[in-house]
């Protein structure tokens, strides 16, 4: 049997390797690395050696068939624990299985679909506010507020109220500090009282305080079954994880979707026509979702172009081989939906917005906006209820268009946010 080869990759500088290139523009760097060196690329970020795998077969091996070899014990995950503790996103093995078993029933397909009235009511509130706006609306903040209000009612049965703005400010400080740590090859002692560290500490404290207030107000019937299933596990960490992850990613996807629709008026008109036919002027029901075909394809195509979770990282716990290349144990392996979703071997015109490409289902493991395998995002079902319903509810009565010529740029932090806030012009449809 031939010996596995060392994967190719850019040489980089003696001490920092490819770090400066990656920090300058992570998204472009990864796309270029795959285009130049293929589907298994060796990269070096300072002292950290990692391999990027971009083939569907390789992604399947890492995320599914050999997931027991590729664990989430990465430096990024270790730093994430400072925010959400030992929770569904940061554990593996038996601890993870116990958490997944406790949480999954709350966000299974049927319970997620049952949240349609909540989604429709809260989305309609935003629609009315936007319709009354003088000229333009703040897309990112309004989508964050909307999805946060939805997940709060789903988890606790109470409105988020004035806590929404405080939570978003705290979360922004926390995520910015986290990403600075991820980008640094040398993680300074986390206790050093830098300005960023102080903002992080204040932010995490505020998030925990908001969680405590929501729990104190919660409808016991809404939380009792999940809390009972969690048993002796740290329920606070799990609830905070669901609260943060359950709105941040969907809000980002919706913001990108609204931008894409504003810049593709024909697709926006198609979605509006569908929504008016299916929904009319009434509140949406669970039976409407399967009929919102174009709205669903728009949301799926948006997550192909701008996957909210743009990068998945794992730690190889033993030597392995992918596509004939050696993956040494102890190294980090990344699967980047941002790269796989734009792979020219599987996507024609990968940079173009074409919702109709989802008339046919993608090749397995070429489209992984919620990850894949056992660790696939537990909130994917709810997101696929929220996304199409919110788009249809918003756009059945208003029209969105761009302001000026600036194009939003993606910021690859923990999630794929927009680098600058987005405002769109709004008029009656």
Image: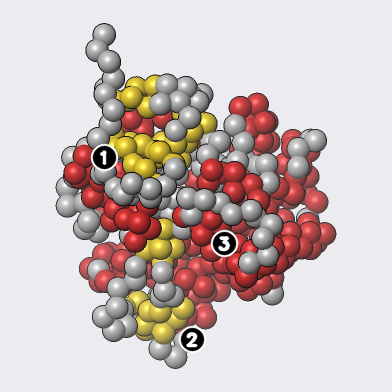
Q: Tag on residue 9?
A: 1
Closer-to-camera residue (186/93): 186
Q: Tag on residue 132?
A: 2
Real-space CA distance between mark 3 and mark 1, rounded to the nearest whole angstrom: 29 Å
Real-space CA distance between mark 2 and mark 3, rounded to the nearest whole angstrom: 37 Å
> Quadrant location of residue 295?
bottom left
Total numbered labels placed on residues in the image: 3
Circle 2 sits in a helix, a strand or a loop, which is it?
loop
Residue drawn at (51%, 57%) of the image: 179
First-in-chain label (3 vs 1)? 1
In the displayed structure, 264 sits above or below 34; it is below
First-in-chain label (1 vs 2)? 1
Closer-to-camera residue (404/288): 404
Residue drawn at (26%, 8%) of the image: 1
Q: Is residue 163 visible in the rendered structure shown here?
A: yes
The residue to which callout 3 is attached is: 177
Circle 3 sits in a helix, a strand or a loop, which is it?
helix
In the rendering, at what x and y percent does residue 385 appear?
A: 49, 52
């Amino acid at each position: 049997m031939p010996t596995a080869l060392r994967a190719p990759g850019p040489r980089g500088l003696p001490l920092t390797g490819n770090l400066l290139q990656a920090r300058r523009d992570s998204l472009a760097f990864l796309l270029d690395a795959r285009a130049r060196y293929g589907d298994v690329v060796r990269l070096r970020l300072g002292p950290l050696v990692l391999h990027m795998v971009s083939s569907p077969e390789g992604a399947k091996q890492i995320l599914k068939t050999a997931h027991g070899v590729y664990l989430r014990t990465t430096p990024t995950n270790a730093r994430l624990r400072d925010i959400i503790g030992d929770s569904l996103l940061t554990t593996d093995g038996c601890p993870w299985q116990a958490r997944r078993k406790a949480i999954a029933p709350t966000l299974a397909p049927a319970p997620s679909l049952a949240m349609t009235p909540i989604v429709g009511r809260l989305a309609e509130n935003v629609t009315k506010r936007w319709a009354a706006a003088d000229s333009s609306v703040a897309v990112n903040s309004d989508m964050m507020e909307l999805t946060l209000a939805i997940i709060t009612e789903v988890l606790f049965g109470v409105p988020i109220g004035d806590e929404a703005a405080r939570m978003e400010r705290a979360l922004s400080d926390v995520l910015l500090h986290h990403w600075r740590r991820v980008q640094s090859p040398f993680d300074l002692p986390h206790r050093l009282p830098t300005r960023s560290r102080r903002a992080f500490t204040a932010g995490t404290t505020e998030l925990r305080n908001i969680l405590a207030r929501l729990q104190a107000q919660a409808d016991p019937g809404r939380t009792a079954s999940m809390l009972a299933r969690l048993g002796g596990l740290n329920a606070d960490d799990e609830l905070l994880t669901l609260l943060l992850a359950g709105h941040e990613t969907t809000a980002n996807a919706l913001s990108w979707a609204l931008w894409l629709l504003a810049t593709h008026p024909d697709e926006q008109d198609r979605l509006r026509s569908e929504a008016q036919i299916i929904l009319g002027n009434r509140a949406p029901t669970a039976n409407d979702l399967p009929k919102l075909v174009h709205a669903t394809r728009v949301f799926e195509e948006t997550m192909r172009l701008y996957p909210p979770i743009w990068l998945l990282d794992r730690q190889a716990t033993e030597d392995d081989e992918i596509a004939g290349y050696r993956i040494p144990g102890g190294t980090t392996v990344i699967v980047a939906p941002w790269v796989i979703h734009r792979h020219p071997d599987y996507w024609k015109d990968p940079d173009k917005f074409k919702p109709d490409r989802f008339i046919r289902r993608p090749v397995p493991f070429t489209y992984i906006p919620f990850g894949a395998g056992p660790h696939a995002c537990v909130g994917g079902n709810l997101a696929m209820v929220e996304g199409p319903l919110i788009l249809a509810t918003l756009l059945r009565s208003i029209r969105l268009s761009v302001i000026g010529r600036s194009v939003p740029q993606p910021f690859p932090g923990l999630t794929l946010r927009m680098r600058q806030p987005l405002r769109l012009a709004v008029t009656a449809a």
